[in-house]
Image (cartoon, rainbow, N blue to C red):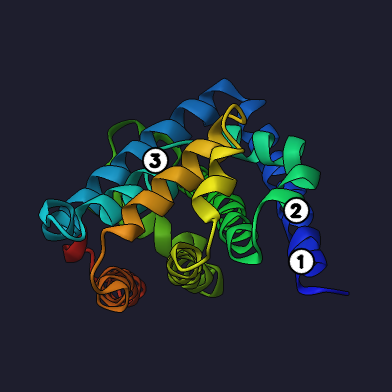
Amino acid sequence: MSDTEDVVERLHHQLDLAAELRGSAEADPDVEAARERLRAWQAARLARTHADLLASPDMGPAATFFLTDVYGSRDLGKLAADVERVVPMMTKLLPLAALETVADAIELHALSEALDFAMVKALGSRARNLAAAAYGDAYRQVGRRDDRERQITLINDLGHALSRLIDQPFVSSGLSRLAGMGELHVFLEHGYDAFRRIDDTEKFLELIVGRERKLLKALFAGDDSLLD
């Protein structure tokens, strides 16, 4: 099996998983509302944690891409649906680096859906007026440390995939041929444009990934102070 076939197989698997998880949440309006409140709270926390990166002229666009398009409050369900529709065309138009970027994003989406769904269940009524102590308690109740660590690893992998993407010849023209394909085109264009502006991709990823790993360790140790 070729590298491209491996990525496409992984992509299909993650798309199926994301659709299943999304359907479970959307089947219950109360769960869906709680999930949206959780995602908004998490997005605000990310903005506090990485405020300096968001304000940086060099790293700001990439930080915004990660904290909104990838890891924040934006619902990637529409992206997943668009990708499902155009996978065969993607393999013809885009290089392996672009396919890896999409596969990492969809896996991160599926994993985040699963973890958010578990958090909503653990929070219960506390999701209506979410605070750091309740979030930390639910985070530890859910556990799944391996999945939390995988979530951060995927952020790192996605960043490196985007870094490789900007070094590929003719990627810009390939992306332009995706115009009209909805969220897929928007997502790749945002990521491509954001990472083209960074002088030091490794430094950016070390900062954002290092902080998220520090937070993970603190939360599992019972320290919720980094959430404020």
Residue drawn at (16%, 64%), measured in percent from left and top?
225
* Circle 2: residue type: Thr
Q: Is residue 166 left or right of residue 214?
A: right
The reply to whether residue 126 is in sight is: no
Image height of 217 relative to 26, above or below? below
The residue tagged 1 is 4
Q: Residue 31: which quarter of the image?
A: top right
Q: Position of residue 16 (x, y in %)?
A: 77, 46
Mark 3 or mark 2: name the one nearer the start of the chain: 3
Q: Position of residue 170 (x, y in %)?
A: 54, 56
Disc 3 crowd, CA 10 A, few/some/many (<14, 14-19, 20+): many
The residue tagged 3 is 39
Q: Secondary structure at mark 3?
A: helix
Mark 1 or mark 2: name the one nearer the start of the chain: 1
Mark 1 or mark 3: name the one nearer the start of the chain: 1
Q: Secondary structure at mark 1?
A: helix
Residue drawn at (83%, 74%), measured in percent from left and top?
2
* Circle 3: residue type: Arg
Cα distance, mark 1 to mark 3?
32 Å
Q: Residue furthest top?
A: 29
The residue tagged 2 is 91
Q: Secondary structure at mark 2?
A: helix
Quarter of the picture containing the N terminus is bottom right
Question: Pointers 3 and 2 in contact (CB under 8 A)?
Answer: no
* Circle 1: residue type: Thr
Q: Position of residue 118 (x, y in %)?
A: 55, 50
Question: Pointers 1 and 2 in contact (CB under 8 A)?
Answer: yes
Quarter of the picture containing the C terminus is bottom left
Q: Residue 214: which quarter of the image?
A: bottom left
